[in-house]
Amino acid sequence: MANNSPSRLIATFALALCTATAMAQEQPAKLPSEPIIVVSGNGEIDVAPDRAVVSLGAVAQDKDAAVAQQKVNKVVQKSLDAISDLGIKKEKIQSQRITLQPVYQQSDESMPRRGPKIVGYEASNQLQITLEDLSQIGPVIDAGVKAGADQVQGVDFSLQDETDATQAALENAVSQAKIKALAIARAADVSLGKVAEIDEGNVQRIFPNVPRMMHMAAAAEVATPVQPGQIQISASVTITYKIK
């Protein structure tokens, strides 16, 4: 009969563990099959935007919620008509945010706390106008303001198609990485071989933005100047080169 006593089982396990440990120590650590150089590169390109989104609207207060809403609706409709008269198509104009909320009386510390008291209502309506002709930005803002809009939330610029700009930024990133790899190879007195691997990093975009302009004067005598600026697109890559 086999002897399966606890002491015999423990001894057998210990012997197997020692054998596995010894075999692992005898195996040398795996080294790269061939020497390599790993470098990173960053590329940037500035391009002019060809699309803009103008955000403007109106806000009004009244003791009656319906009256506050009607005031805003009247102003926004006049703004829509004025912007449409500039030749802006209806599909380029979109309602962005419509709100109606109560206005509360400020608390008086001299009076006992009775909870907030509603003293009126505030209605607002914001529009987004998408423009491919950037020369229309100023006229659109002026038309809306003259029609009664008292809030301009800003202008956001972008590109209709980023493909070419992104490719150019990636090419610049690859070129920079190669220059760095060649410099390292010369300093190490080795020759740069073929590319073994390329990893694309993140593509980032920095868009120009016109800061928010609140409560603009409706009777502005000077046309609103807007400079589109440049959109910066940056890309990064990591390239592994073989060493000859």
Image (tube, grey):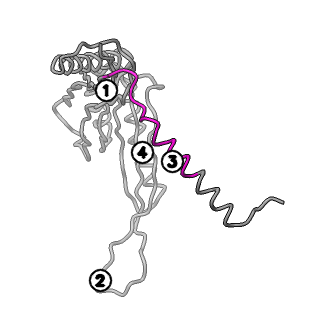
Name the mark on residue 21.
3
Whether residue 25 is in magenta: the answer is yes
Q: Residues within 10 Å of mark 2 (few under 14, many from 20)?
A: few
Alpha carbons under labels 3 and 2: distance apart: 78 Å
Under mark 1, the amino acid is: Ser
Residue 182 appears in the rendering = yes
Residues at marks 4 and 1 touching, judged by CB atoms closer than 8 Å: no
Name the mark on residue 125.
4
Of circles 3 and 4, the one toward us is: 3
Q: Earlier in the sequence, mark 3 or mark 1?
A: 3
Under mark 3, the amino acid is: Thr
46, 16: nearer the viewer: 16
What's the residue at 25%, 31% (across, down)? Answer: 208
117, 34: nearer the viewer: 34
The magenta segment: 17-36
Residues at marks 3 and 1 touching, judged by CB atoms closer than 8 Å: no
Whether residue 65 is in magenta: the answer is no
15, 117: nearer the viewer: 15
Q: Residues within 10 Å of mark 3 (few under 14, many from 20)?
A: few
Q: Give the structural element (helix, strand or loop) at label 1.
A: strand
Q: Give the structural element (helix, strand or loop) at label 2.
A: loop
Residues at marks 3 and 4 touching, judged by CB atoms closer than 8 Å: no
Residue 135 appears in the rendering = no
Under mark 4, the amino acid is: Asn
Q: Which residue is mark 2?
A: 109
Of circles 4 and 1, the one toward us is: 1
Name the mark on residue 236.
1
**In the picture, which quadrant includes the C terminus?**
top left
Q: Earlier in the sequence, mark 1 or mark 2?
A: 2
Name the mark on residue 221.
none
